[in-house]
Image: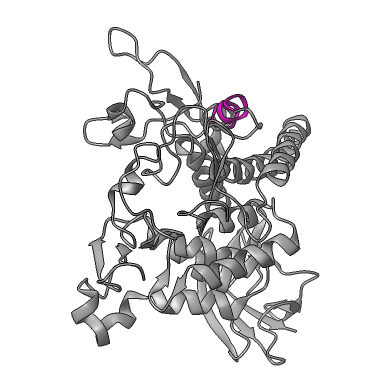
Amino acid sequence: DGSAMHQFNPLTMVGSMGDAMEMEDRPHYYSDDSLWAVLAACAYLKESGDFAFLEAQVPFYEKDRHEQPVETGSVWEHLQRAVAFTHQDRGAHGLPLLGFADWNDTLNLAAGAESLLTACLYGRALADLAELAHWRGDAATAAQYQAWFAEMRARVQEYGWDGEWFISYLDAEGAPLGSHLNPAGQIYAYGQAWPVMAGFATPEQAEQALEAVYRRLNTTQGIQLSAPGFDGYDPAKGGITTYPPGAKENGGIFMHVNPWVMVAETLVGHGDRAYQYYAQTNPAAKNERIEVYECEPYVYPQNVLGGEHPQFGLARNSWLSGTAAWMYQAATQYILGVRPTYAGLRVDPCIPAGWEGFRMRRCFRGAWYVIEVRNPQHTGRGVAAVTLDGRRLADNLLPVQPGGGVHQVVVTLG
């Protein structure tokens, strides 16, 4: 049906729905799980150019009584079913149903709740698939996904804006969570980053929402996931309320969220702010306060205790995190701004204004690009000129070099 298992063991090939099975009065699926495959597959195709991968036949997880797959389909079919599942799995306001939870595993609202995060992730997945369909010459499918995108953007605009930032959930009765109306959990960092990353926020909303993150959630040790924290267990909210204020998802500095905000900041042109967030969460910068931090300075932890906790700055669960891959994307593809596309490498930096520039060596589809970015006017962004092996290009797209080799690129900002 296009949904996905929450956990999967590659050694046993067995999946499970995780904690969703532990609460009988909650849905037994996570609304975001299937959509990440779309982002991953499109990223792989942009990097590799291996479009034959889309035709690979892969069994669906569901099995018959003999433990054999009920059906097999192409990778393209799997991706299409993922967005189709979300398209039909929507609540009273036309937003995706939350299921047991979204990316925030600990926020477990009663059946019927809707998730703005899943709405935005769905939007990002639709945009990716529309672009891929267009690249494959399938104009009809691209148009369908663009229409679904516009429809969901309208729902987010109608129900998601809280005046200074975006809400994150509507419960089964239609009441918001992540709103100034809530005594706790008034604002969620991912609830501000993802509308920008999805292309759902207006420029004015993007500026206001990200400023609210800086004002309400940023600390010297990183961006807190939410604020203020819940103080005491609330069965209506679920696992998030089992932690004390400032810990883990309940207002802790959940590292996985930080690079999403960095990406969003670069999308609105805030290179200084994006790099500030990157630098303040860098584990290598923690050596001078390791007696407080208490985790290895060479790997990201899952979380750091936030400002509402008496042990503010204490890191926990090192290695257990999706942070590293997202930090790599935020740093290389958005701050340094060298992003793979189906047609080549797009160079669109958003760096601190004070930098003179930077150099990068990037291998892409068998060729090496030696990239020098110059920032003579200290704008930090805005590509004024690009040369490839001494030849000026019409835009900032470095075309694929099928012959391999080493190629010299100079990018001037201004």
Q: Position of residue 178 (x, y in %)?
A: 53, 51
In screen coordinates, is 366 left or right of 349?
A: left
Q: Which x, y percent locates residue 245? A: 33, 60
Report the residue at 42% width, 65% height from top: 224
Q: Nearer the viewer, residue 21 or 396?
A: 21
Tell me which colouring the rendered structure shows: one colour
On the image, the x and y values in percent for residue 308 come to 35, 67
Q: Residue furthest right?
A: 394
Tell me if residue 162 comes above or below residue 207 in the rendering: above
Number of numbered tags placed on the structure image: 0
Q: Is residue 261 left or right of residue 383?
A: left
Q: Is residue 360 visible?
A: yes
Q: Quadrant of the C terminus?
A: bottom right
User: Can the viewer see residue 367 in this picture?
Assistant: no
Predominant secondary structure, magenta span: helix
Range of residues picked out in magenta: 81-90
The residue shown at (38%, 63%) is: 255
Asked if residue 52 is positioned above or below residue 312 in the image, the reply reads above
**Up/down of 336 relative to 26, above or below:** below
What x and y, as percent, mark residue 306?
Answer: 35, 68
* 87 inside magenta stretch: yes
Horizontal placement of 64 versus 274: left or right? Answer: left
Q: Splitting the image into 4 quarters, where does residue 379 fall?
A: bottom right
Residue drawn 32% across and 36% down?
Answer: 7
Q: Residue furthest top?
A: 65
| Residue toward you, 396 or 239 | 239
Q: Does the stretch in magenta take in 284?
A: no
| Residue located 58% across and 32% down the image | 83
Q: Nearer the viewer, residue 37 or 270?
A: 270
